[in-house]
Amino acid sequence: MTIKQMYFSILYLTEYSEECSMKIFGKPTWELTSEEWDIVERETEEGVYL
């Protein structure tokens, strides 16, 4: 994997976790509690919304 590919995959995951956070809790990731963040992180990894 090139640096460019790594950059874009990290960018995609960051964007996707924001999307999950808004869809699940209705707030951005920086406002989440650690328990909420764990859920968003798990959903992002699985690529599935609750």
Image: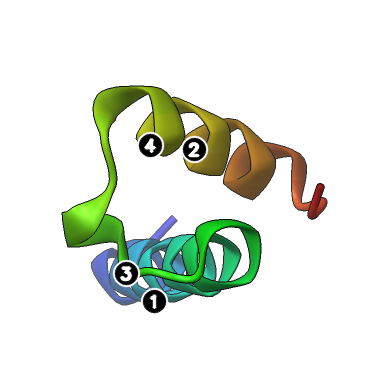
Give the Cα separation between the discs numbered 4 and 2: 6 Å
Give the Cα separation between the discs numbered 1 and 4: 22 Å
Q: Position of residue 30 (x, y in %)?
A: 17, 58
Q: Position of residue 17 (x, y in %)?
A: 47, 60
Q: Please state which of residues 49 and 47 is positioned toward the viewer in this rendering.
A: 49
Give the Cα separation between the discs numbered 3 and 2: 13 Å
Mark earlier in primary sequence (3, 2): 3
Helix, strand or loop at disc 4?
helix
Q: Please state which of residues 29 and 7 is positioned toward the viewer in this rendering.
A: 29
Instruction: Identify residue type, mark 2.
Output: Glu
Q: Which residue is mark 3?
A: 28
Number of on-image labels: 4
Instruction: Identify residue type, mark 3.
Output: Pro
Residue drawn at x 36%, y 65% is: 14
Instruction: Identify residue type, mark 4.
Output: Trp
Residue drawn at x 54%, y 74% is: 19
Helix, strand or loop at disc 2?
helix
Mark 1 or 4: in front is: 4
Q: Which residue is mark 1?
A: 8
As drawn, 5 above or below 46: below
Q: Position of residue 18 (x, y in %)?
A: 42, 69
Give the Cα separation between the discs numbered 1 and 3: 21 Å
Whether residues under marks 1 and 2 lie with C-beta atoms below 8 angstroms apart, the answer is no
Helix, strand or loop at disc 1?
helix
Q: Which residue is mark 4?
A: 37
